[in-house]
């Protein structure tokens, strides 16, 4: 994660390549709508896994496709369960629904769940996150959804209690009919709780916060760490990127004294293309070793 | 003597059944109204954005929508009586 332009995509590319070279099976997934991985590796990537090098595959997700598919699926379910007249009146709403606030980050959640399900057997799933705003919304979505779901669940259970009283007073035989809406809410609760647990578990989710040695980057990174802390998510590591000889990192060291910090040097050569990336890795092997060191125990368990 | 007491007993049972039915009916009217209003609140909470009210994250509303045709129809009916909510309430509580 990090402010736009600090080098998140390049850091993700370097980490992925380094791990692949060490023999680990890695999938690099770009969740940033403004994809960069194709440009960095100078290889065409799509929303299907494409080989970059041995042990490394890459995906650039199509957010619009995921939103459209989700809305199509909802509309299909509505057409199945609603009477014709009601379904006809709702059609016009779905044409504008894809622009609704909240669906962007939900599309990323759908992608995350899909990738996790299909590629769980790999050693590492590396996600190149979008810039701060969308990245934070992605991590916050399970927590915020659970707050609403708890309220809806309580109200729905009250409604069912009232209906049970009506059944008893009418002295009619109580049909064992489960409330479909209650079942769906419980299913959603389980789903979001599972996601929340994954994000909060430091063994499963490692968040690298990438910043540059400048005031703006430091200010935004501080806000990111605070926002994540509010939802019980911790950063595993800070990557102080584009460090030059005269760069001062006192402020960064003071602000993030409780998070491991890795200094990543500035590269005179533009890190575009496999050759340049591999050359950088060769020259800075110890830096990358330090960056991925905390990931290796989880891979060993697999 | 026995037939008279049987007749009286049957009459008493009949009176009891009538009284019981009336009491249940009265109780039911109130509870059914409350249950319907709670259904309405639930519909507004989940689908309120369709009538200009703040609502849960969009994906929660969309995920529940296929199961909520009844609540949606209820909301549409409520729009018809929205300009006379007091008369609706008075009618429900039998106030003339």
Image (cartoon, coloured by chain):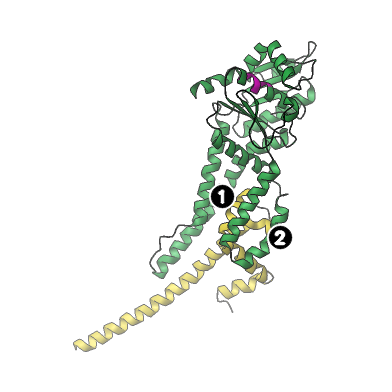
Chain colours: A green, B yellow
Residue in the picture at 71% in, 16% down: A264
Q: Main secondary structure of the magenta part?
A: helix
Q: Is residue A9 magenta?
A: no
Camera-side residue of A164 and A236:
A236
Residue at label 2? Answer: A92
Q: Residues within 10 Å of mark 1 (few under 14, many from 20)?
A: few
Secondary structure state at the residue bearing disc 1: helix
Q: Quadrant of residue A109?
A: top right
Instruction: First in sequence, mark 1 or 2: give its number.
Output: 2
In-image side of B6 versus B70 (left or right)? left
Task: Tell me how far mark 1 sits from mark 2, CA to CA.
Answer: 29 Å
Secondary structure state at the residue bearing disc 2: helix
Camera-side residue of A45 and B16:
A45
Residue B56 can be seen, yes or no: no
Residue in the picture at 31% in, 82% down: B12
Q: Quadrant of residue B3?
A: bottom left
In percent of width and height, residue A86 lies at: 63, 65
Q: Chain of mark 2?
A: A
Q: Chain of mark 1?
A: A
In percent of width and height, residue B66 lies at: 58, 57
In percent of width and height, residue A108 lies at: 65, 39
Q: Residues within 10 Å of mark 2 (few under 14, many from 20)?
A: few
- Nearer to us of marks 1 and 2 is 2
Residue in the picture at 45% in, 57% down: A178
| Count of picture labels | 2
* Whether labels 1 and 2 share one chain: yes
Residue at label 1? Answer: A151
Residue that sits furthest to the left in the current view: B1
- Do the CB atoms of the residues marked 1 and 2 lie less than 8 Å apart? no
The range drawn in magenta is A14-19
Camera-side residue of A87 and B37:
A87
In percent of width and height, residue A222 lies at: 71, 27
């Amino acid at each position: 994660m990090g402010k736009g332009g600090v080098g998140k995509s390049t850091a993700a590319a370097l980490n992925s390549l380094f791990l692949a070279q060490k023999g680990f099976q890695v999938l690099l997934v770009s969740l940033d709508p403004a994809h960069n991985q194709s440009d960095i590796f100078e290889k065409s990537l799509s929303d299907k896994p494409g080989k970059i090098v041995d042990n490394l595959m890459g995906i650039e997700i199509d957010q619009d496709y995921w939103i459209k598919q989700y809305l199509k699926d909802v509309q299909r379910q509505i057409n199945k369960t609603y009477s014709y007249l009601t379904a006809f009146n709702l059609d016009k709403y779905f044409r504008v629904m894809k622009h609704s606030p909240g669906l962007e980050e939900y599309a990323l959640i759908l992608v995350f769940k899909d990738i996790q399900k299909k590629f769980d057997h790999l050693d590492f799933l590396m996600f190149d996150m979008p810039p701060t705003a969308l990245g934070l919304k992605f991590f916050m979505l399970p927590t915020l959804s659970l707050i609403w779901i708890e309220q809806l669940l309580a109200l729905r259970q009250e409604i069912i209690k009232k209906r049970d009283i009506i059944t008893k007073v009418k002295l009619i035989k109580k049909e064992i009919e489960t409330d479909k809406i209650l079942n769906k809410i419980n299913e959603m609760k389980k789903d979001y709780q599972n996601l929340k647990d994954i994000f909060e578990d430091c063994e499963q989710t490692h968040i690298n916060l990438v910043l540059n040695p400048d005031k703006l980057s430091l200010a935004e990174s501080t806000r990111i760490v605070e926002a994540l802390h509010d939802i019980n998510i911790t950063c595993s590591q800070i990557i102080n990127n584009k460090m030059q000889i005269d760069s001062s990192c006192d402020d960064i060291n003071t602000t993030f004294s409780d998070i491991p910090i890795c200094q990543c040097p500035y590269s005179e050569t533009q890190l575009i293309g496999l050759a340049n990336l591999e050359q950088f890795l060769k020259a800075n092997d110890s830096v990358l070793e330090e960056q991925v060191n905390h990931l290796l125990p989880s891979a060993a368990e697999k | 003597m026995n037939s008279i007491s049987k007749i009286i007993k049957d009459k008493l049972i009949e009176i009891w059944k009538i009284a019981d039915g009336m009491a249940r009916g009265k109780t039911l009217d109130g509870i059914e109204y409350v249950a319907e209003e709670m259904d309405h609140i639930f519909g507004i909470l989940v689908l309120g954005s369709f009538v200009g009210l703040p609502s849960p994250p969009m994906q929660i509303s969309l995920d529940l929508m296929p199961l909520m045709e009844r609540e949606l129809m209820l909301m549409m009916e409520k729009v018809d009586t929205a300009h006379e909510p007091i008369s609706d309430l008075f009618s429900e509580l039998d106030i003339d």
